[in-house]
Image: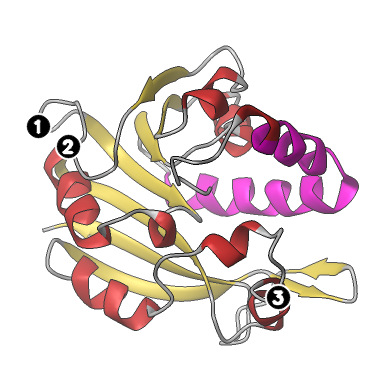
Amino acid sequence: MDMNKHDGKKDWERYVQSCESGFWNEIFKLETGFLRERLQGAVDVLSIGCGPAAIEKSLSKLSFKMTGFDISIEALGMAPDGIRKICGTAEELPFEDASFDAVIFVVSLQFVRDFRRSLEEAARVLRRKGRMVAMMLNPESDFYKERISRDASYVARIRHSNIDEMEKAARRFFKVDAEFFLGVEDGRIFENQTDRAVLKVLNGIKI
């Protein structure tokens, strides 16, 4: 989710409306299933940059105790009941050390001002051997290349496109395995695991 401060209520209303399409519902369904597998055993989960929290809502129905965190109070105002919602910046998380079993970034880490500081904060609030999952848009994917040229697309607001550098930063705090996930082609959605997939995902265990 885009975490830029200039996002207003109308921007988020348009985003929520677009998410109700069958296309995005299918993507969210696949992403929810993906996260469910990688969060097995976790209970308390923090989602940094949750926006209106569509995926977080689905995860809460799977018995995860979700905390949605975002810089936009307007976005959080559209988030569903059933999850805890807190507004703030990803670089200064208002939580005690060792508060969560898992921290997730659902296409949000590339939009924060300082991804290194955000990863450090994620590690701080994780319990011993806690999990970090960061879904990042893959600049080598056709989806990224097509959307980055659209001024109206959230992808055009991305701050960090060097995902190799972001993976390197994550390895300071986590033991990381990386994988590719999700294909989109001609409106068709499928489970692509090649280096042209829409997402590169960092699966980390706190060091």
Q: Which residue is mark 1?
A: 97
Q: Residue at x 41, y 62 (%)?
A: 110
Q: Per the image, is 153 magenta? A: no
> Of discs 1 and 3, which sits in the foreground?
3
**Label 2 sits on what residue type?**
Val
Identify the mark nearer the N-term, 1 or 3.
1
Q: Which residue is mark 3?
A: 143
Range drawn in magenta: 11-39
* Relative vertical location of residue 173 with respect to residue 71 in this rendering, above or below: below
Element carrying mark 2: helix
- Whether pointer 1 and pointer 3 mark residues with C-beta atoms closer than 8 Å, the reply is no
Q: Which residue is mark 2?
A: 125
- Whether pointer 2 and pointer 1 mark residues with C-beta atoms closer than 8 Å, the reply is yes
Given residues 42 and 184, the one toward you in this image is 184
Main structural element of the magenta stretch: helix, strand or loop? helix
Identify the mark nearer the N-term, 2 or 1.
1
Given residues 63 and 71, the one toward you in this image is 71
